[in-house]
């Protein structure tokens, strides 16, 4: 019952209180409230003066004087719940708005008509409610079996409990603040722990007991760290949680003052399997032992730290999101060796790492199949001064073992000048390689394995404001699509290409040149040819007179012919594919090639350089 009557503390109000509040807001004063407001004051005065025999109001009290003395000794009053009825009082009893008796605080005394009277507090109707729980002082009474109420109509707060503060029975009274609980901030005893290298310490910030140890940590506690003492060099610590079912430890966080962390294989014989919370701006080094048990780096594990390099343990199986995001000094990452468990580079893993080396992408383990959303986004210096700022992340070489490059995976890497996509990549998401202005005029080859590509995957448009007006710089790349069966993605609610009454994502950006097959492997018009027909005649709306797109078609029948010394071998390299030519006895040769596609011939003869 008490829980249902909390007002300020718990946010609950009785049904009666809600009705009174609604009536108050509408300007209507219920007859019960009017009756209570007048009667309660008169009743308090009569009782205080001792003018009426107690027997007329309640059984169980011998004299009004005794009741007064009881109230004075108790020095408490009832608190209104904000709707004119008594709420949780400081002495622990509260009147209910539905005829319920108070929660324990006054002695229950049945009147002749079956009601209860609370001296110095609210009088509630008892036609429907149960009797009050027995208490030490005071009593409650109902005026009649008809359920009418007698109430103080105010918050009672006088020291003697007899005089109430002026209140509004219709609902303008405020609830009294509860007495402070001396045990509220007591964390209780620390959990049992049988180790010697770590001990449970209560962390006020996180509000829980954590295992603390200085094992593997270099540095002193900083302001804000638990145990920090100004002017005293106190060793920094790492804070752990223990899974009692598996007996495994998780690095919860390290102190802000930690500058280096050699992640222990074990603490008190228990393996550390998960690491997180190491994003301290002072942390410059993290190392793992050869026998590390760490299988997971959790969300934001090193985000914002000052790491310059890191070698990930061979035991690692998965990464959380944002593990290295905003590590502005991170340059190199040594991926796990002899490990085929790592499948994904999650969302924003390296986002904002503006000193990252090209090798981090090129050396992605063969087990990784997905580069997720914004995994390498904005990997470029935020402030670049020509000749002064080291230029990093200038090439993106995605291994062919990766299957999916998700949306915005490399977006905003503004210093990239070269993109290589390995044969094996199947899908490229929206804006995966967008906002790379230095790619202007470069060619990107999409290998035959690429089946689909999202909207504006290679859009490098820059909008430049000048005194003469706004300039739209396209910085477009040339896309060479080697899959004759490349497909468009149907998009019912926003596609910008309409073909045969259906809408599709447009994978191409305004200003681009697209070199592709006009026919599919089945001899039908390819999807790219159908897209070209759909946009035929469109102009760049911001650069009048220029076509929106330029399409060039590769034909299978092109040939390269020539003559070389007898006995020589000829190999044609085109788009990363090597084709050996047939050389006749007189040295003449012919080899099939793609039209409109750069090609390299390699002539090899024993005893000579190629």
Image (cartoon, helix red, strand yellow):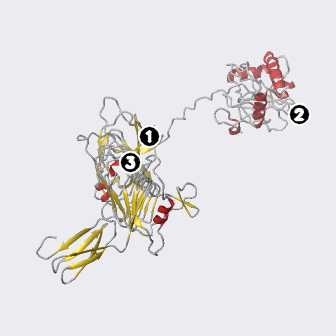
Residue under the image location 35 percent in, 48 percent down: 437
Residue under the image location 38 percent in, 36 percent down: 225
The label on residue 490 is none
Give the distance between the C-alpha atoms of the residues marked 2 and 3, in whole angstroms: 76 Å
Q: Choose between 376 and 427: the one closer to the eye.
A: 427
**Secondary structure of the residue carrying numbered label 3:** loop
**Secondary structure of the residue carrying numbered label 1:** strand
Query: Residue 95's spot in the image, x, y percent?
Result: 75, 32
* Residue tagged 3: 412
Indicate whether 491 appears above or below 125.
below
Q: Answer with the quarter of the image where residue 265 lies.
A: bottom left
Mark 2 vs mark 3: give the one in front: 3
Query: Residue 286's spot in the image, x, y percent?
Result: 30, 48
Indicate whether 449 appears above or below 92.
below
Mark 3 vs mark 1: which is more N-terminal? 1
The label on residue 146 is 2
Mark 1 vs mark 2: which is more N-terminal? 2
* Residue tagged 1: 202
């Amino acid at each position: 019952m008490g829980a249902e009557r909390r007002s300020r503390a718990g946010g609950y109000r009785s049904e009666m209180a809600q009705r009174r509040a609604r009536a108050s807001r509408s300007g209507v004063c219920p007859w019960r409230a009017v009756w209570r407001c007048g009667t309660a004051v008169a009743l308090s005065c009569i009782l205080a003066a001792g003018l009426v025999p107690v027997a007329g109001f309640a059984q169980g009290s011998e004299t009004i004087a005794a009741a007064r003395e009881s109230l004075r000794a108790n020095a408490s009053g009832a608190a209104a719940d904000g709707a004119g009825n008594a709420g949780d009082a400081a002495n622990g009893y509260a009147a209910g708005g539905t005829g319920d008796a108070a929660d324990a605080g006054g002695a229950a005394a049945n009147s002749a008509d079956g009601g209860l009277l609370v001296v110095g507090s609210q009088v509630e109707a008892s036609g429907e409610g149960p009797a009050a729980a027995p208490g030490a002082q005071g009593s409650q009474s109902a005026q009649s079996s008809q359920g009418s109420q007698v109430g103080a109509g105010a918050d009672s707060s006088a020291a003697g409990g007899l005089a109430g503060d002026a209140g509004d029975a219709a609902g303008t009274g405020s609830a009294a603040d509860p007495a402070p609980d001396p045990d509220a901030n007591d964390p209780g005893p620390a959990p049992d722990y049988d180790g010697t290298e770590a001990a449970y310490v209560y962390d006020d910030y996180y509000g829980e007991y954590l295992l603390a140890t200085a094992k593997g940590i270099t540095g002193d506690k900083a302001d804000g760290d638990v145990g920090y003492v100004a002017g005293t060099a106190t060793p920094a610590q790492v804070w752990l949680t223990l899974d009692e079912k598996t007996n495994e430890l998780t690095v919860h966080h390290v102190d802000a003052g930690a500058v280096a962390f050699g992640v222990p294989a074990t603490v008190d014989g228990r393996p550390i399997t998960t690491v997180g919370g190491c994003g301290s701006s002072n942390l410059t080094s993290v190392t793992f032992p050869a026998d590390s048990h760490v299988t997971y780096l959790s969300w934001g594990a090193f985000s914002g730290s000052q790491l310059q390099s890191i070698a990930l343990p061979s035991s690692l199986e998965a990464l959380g999101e944002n593990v290295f995001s905003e590590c502005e000094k991170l340059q190199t990452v040594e991926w796990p060796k002899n490990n085929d468990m790592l499948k994904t580079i999650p969302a924003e893993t390296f986002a904002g790492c503006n000193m990252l080396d090209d090798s981090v992408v090129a050396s992605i383990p063969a087990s990784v199949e997905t580069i997720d959303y914004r995994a390498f986004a904005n990997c470029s210096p935020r402030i670049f001064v020509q000749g002064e700022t080291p230029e990093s992340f200038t090439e993106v070489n995605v291994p062919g073992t990766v299957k999916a490059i998700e949306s915005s995976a490399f977006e905003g890497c503004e210093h990239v000048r070269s993109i290589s996509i390995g044969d094996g990549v199947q899908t490229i998401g929206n804006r995966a390689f967008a906002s790379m202005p230095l790619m202007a005029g470069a060619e990107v080859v999409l290998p035959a394995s690429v089946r689909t590509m999202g909207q504006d995957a290679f859009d490098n448009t820059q909008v430049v404001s000048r005194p003469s007006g706004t300039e739209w710089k396209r910085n477009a790349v040339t896309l060479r699509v080697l899959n004759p069966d490349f497909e468009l993605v149907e998009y019912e609610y926003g596609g910008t290409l309409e073909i045969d009454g259906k809408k599709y994502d447009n994978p191409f950006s305004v200003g681009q040149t697209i070199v592709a097959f006009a026919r599919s492997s089945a001899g039908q018009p390819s999807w790219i040819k159908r897209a070209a027909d759909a946009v035929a005649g469109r102009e760049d709306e911001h650069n009048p007179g220029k076509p929106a797109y330029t399409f060039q078609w590769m034909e299978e029948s092109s040939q390269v012919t020539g003559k070389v010394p007898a006995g020589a071998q000829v190999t044609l390299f085109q788009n990363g594919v090597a084709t050996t030519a047939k050389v006749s006895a007189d040295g003449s040769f012919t080899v099939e090639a793609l039209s409109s596609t750069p090609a390299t011939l390699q002539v090899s003869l024993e005893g000579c350089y190629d």
